[in-house]
Each structure stands twice: as C-alpha cells, then as structure tokens.
C-alpha cells in the first residue's frame, strides 16, 4: 500500500489554516490540478461529500468524488475517494488523505498523509504511484502556504 507523508511548517495558526483545508470549495486555491469543486453536500465537515474536477496535462477534466471521514476543528481533516462505479475503481481499492495541523510556536506544522491501496496488476506500479503522490502532496503544501504562511522545504517520509 503506497503511503506517502509530507510535512511543512507554515507561518499561520491552525485556526487560519483550518477553514481552507476543511472547505472543499477552497481546493482549487491550493490542491494541484483542481479546476473546480461541485456538488458539495453537507453542512458539517464530517460526512461532507463533493466532486473535485481535476485537469489532465492535455486539458481534459476528470471528476473524482470524495467524502470527509473524520474532522477535528483546527487539528485534523481526513477524506476518502469514492471509487464504486468510477474509472478509478479498476486501479484503486481505497484512497484516503489526512491533513494534520499541529501548533508550533506562532506557526503550524502541517502533515499530509496519503494512503492508497492498489488493485490487481496496478500494485506493480506502487513505486511510480508513490513518487507521483509525493509530488502532488509537495505541491499541495506549497499551494496551502501561499495563503497561509512563509516558505520552508517539505520533508519526505515514507
């Protein structure tokens, strides 16, 4: 199971970062290749569902559905991709992302963890999936930093 972790210290409080990471409508501001978010359902973060439209390198849109599985204000937000009946179903058994916020003096240590369980022959692509996911998480942290804090290198942890 590819598990990828990236960390970055941002010059903002967890209270400043939380509204961005917990509201799917903000994803185009910071999550790589996201062009828009549609069909957001649910008022509370936990249980909320949405459709994320991602742009491929050749400019086509790919739709992916998600739901928040757990949320703790200013601390943690985790969501999973809904795979049944989608093209992703042939590749993935599960895909979950968790964002953790931990106060560090006047900054926040942001940790993003992606866990994916690959299906069938897709498991052979695990090293490539891990590298691609790492790049996506690094880019997400840079995007989050633009609106929330100062620069600092992301750490790679597997």
Image (cartoon, rainbow, N blue to C red):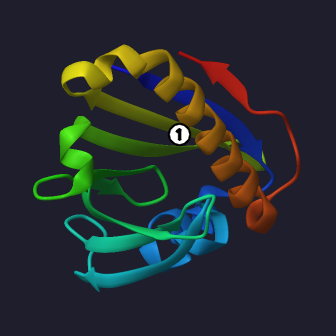
Quadrant position of the N terminus in the picture: top left
Who is closer to the viewer here, 24 or 32?
32
Residue at 35% across, 55% down: 72
Horizontal and vertical percent position of residue 28: 59, 73
**Residue farthest to the left?**
84
Q: Is residue 129 visible?
A: yes
Who is closer to the viewer here, 24 or 149?
24
Q: Which residue is mark 1?
A: 112
Horizontal and vertical percent position of residue 121: 25, 20
Res 34 quadrant in image: bottom right
Res 52 quadrant in image: bottom left
User: 129 above or below 42?
Assistant: above
Image position of 2 (left or right of 152): left
Who is closer to the viewer here, 109 or 138?
138
Image position of 98 (left or right of 28): left
Horizontal and vertical percent position of residue 36: 51, 79
Image position of 143 (left or right of 96): right
User: 38 above or below 103?
Assistant: below
Q: Is residue 23 visible?
A: no
Res 71 quadrant in image: bottom left
Q: Secondary structure at mark 1?
A: strand
Horizontal and vertical percent position of residue 111: 57, 37
Residue at 11% across, 58% down: 85
């Amino acid at each position: 199971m590819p598990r990828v972790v990236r960390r970055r210290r941002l010059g903002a409080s967890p209270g400043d970062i939380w509204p961005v990471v917990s509201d799917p409508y903000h994803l185009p501001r910071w999550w790589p290749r996201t062009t828009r978010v549609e069909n957001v359902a649910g008022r509370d973060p936990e249980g909320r569902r949405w459709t994320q439209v991602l742009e491929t390198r050749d400019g086509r849109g790919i739709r992916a559905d998600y739901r928040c599985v757990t949320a703790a204000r200013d601390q943690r937000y985790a969501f999973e991709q809904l795979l049944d009946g989608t093209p992703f179903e042939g590749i993935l058994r599960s895909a979950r992302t968790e964002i953790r916020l931990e106060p560090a003096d006047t900054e926040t240590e942001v940790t993003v963890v992606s866990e994916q369980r690959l299906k069938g022959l897709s498991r052979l692509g695990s090293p490539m999936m891990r590298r691609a996911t790492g790049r996506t998480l690094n880019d997400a942290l840079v995007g989050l930093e633009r609106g929330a804090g100062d620069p600092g290198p992301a750490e790679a942890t597997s």
